[in-house]
Image: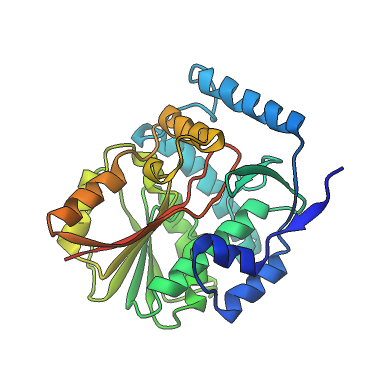
């Protein structure tokens, strides 16, 4: 039996190459991110399962490619959160049901076994809150694109007491959730808008000093990101922050990273986005502030690499 370990605030600072605020350090301690290393046999079994999944013909949710054709599945998923918040009017009901489904997750290029529930949600929420605190403290409006049930967006209020919050998503269930949140008084300075990455709505007003955020949302658009990039260049927000699957930041000589990249391609996740941003920077059209890994992930992928940039 392996000895349990815990991810401390110091370790997260080391991984993210940053200094966390006292608020986020306390969040880390409260989260109690306890886990254990897995055995060589468990690692072999893990690799075998991932390889088998990669070899499958598109038979289930673990292998079906992402894209515009899956909107009905997202309507159904966020509809479950909508039903829950209507009944309980509790922010916890907005957390997607897919967290905690697997007994193994990724951390620092290893596969580990969490010993607490919602480990993957808790560590991601700390990372999301860190980027919001770091880059959106002075934003007048925070737009989250692909916000789903807006569970990340609502936490932004802790780090910016004055900003207007705008949650954008292609599902109607998302806007209904945000309306419920507003009517129940959970958060009143918020609005929901329908938005499709493939056909952006240019009528949306973007005030000065606005920030754009995506968290595992652009992953759904494969290599068809240019319509959204054009939208951003047109609207000129002060800052854009993405936590998304990015091939180019993973180590293709590392087996665990390589499996993640192969899964990206199997599912048709975001592809070519960072190289396009680098090209735009070379052309003098944007400035990339940072591009880095967060070294955290789910069973199949390390899907939350960080890119921060802004149009010039």
Q: Position of residue 272 (x, y in %)?
A: 29, 40
Q: Is residue 159 above or below residue 245?
A: below
Viewer-nearest residue: 2 or 155: 2
Residue 202 seen = no
- Quadrant of the drawing holding the N terminus: top right
Viewer-nearest residue: 113 or 151: 113
Q: Is residue 30 above or below residue 293?
A: below
Q: Residue furthest bottom?
A: 162
Q: Is residue 172 above or below residue 157?
A: above
Residue at point 34% right, 36% down?
68
Left or right of residue 144, residue 92 in this image: right
Left or right of residue 281, residue 27 in this image: right
Residue at point 26% right, 43% down?
198
Residue 236: quarter of image = bottom left
Residue 261: quarter of image = top left
Residue at point 76% right, 29% down?
41
């Amino acid at each position: 039996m392996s000895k349990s370990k815990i991810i401390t605030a110091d370790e997260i600072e080391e991984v993210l190459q940053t200094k966390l605020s006292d608020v986020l350090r306390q969040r880390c301690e409260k989260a109690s991110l306890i886990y254990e290393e897995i055995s060589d046999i468990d690692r072999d079994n893990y690799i075998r399962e991932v390889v088998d999944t990669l070899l499958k013909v598109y038979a289930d949710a673990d292998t079906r490619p992402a894209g515009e054709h899956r909107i009905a599945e997202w309507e159904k998923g966020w509809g479950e959160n909508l039903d829950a918040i209507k009944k309980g009017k509790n922010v916890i009901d907005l957390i997607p049901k897919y967290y905690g489904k697997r007994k193994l997750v990724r951390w620092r290029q290893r596969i580990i076994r969490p010993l607490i529930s919602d480990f993957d949600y808790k560590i991601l929420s700390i990372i999301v809150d860190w980027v919001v605190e770091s880059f959106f403290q002075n934003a007048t409006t925070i737009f989250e694109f692909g916000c789903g049930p807006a569970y990340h967006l609502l936490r932004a209020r802790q780090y910016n007491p004055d900003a207007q919050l705008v949650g954008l998503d292609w599902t109607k269930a998302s806007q209904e959730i945000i309306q419920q949140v507003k009517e129940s008084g959970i958060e009143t300075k918020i609005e929901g808008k329908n938005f499709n990455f493939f056909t952006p709505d240019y009528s949306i007003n973007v005030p000065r000093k606005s920030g754009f955020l995506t968290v595992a949302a652009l992953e759904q658009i494969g290599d068809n990101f240019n319509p959204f990039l054009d939208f951003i260049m047109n609207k000129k927000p002060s800052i854009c922050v993405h936590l998304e699957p990015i091939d180019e930041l993973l180590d293709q000589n590392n087996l665990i990273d390589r499996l993640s990249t192969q899964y990206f391609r199997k599912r048709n996740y975001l592809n070519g986005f960072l190289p396009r941003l680098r090209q735009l920077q070379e052309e003098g059209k944007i400035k990339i502030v940072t591009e880095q890994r967060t070294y955290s992930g789910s069973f199949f992928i390390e899907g939350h690499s960080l890119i921060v940039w802004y149009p010039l």
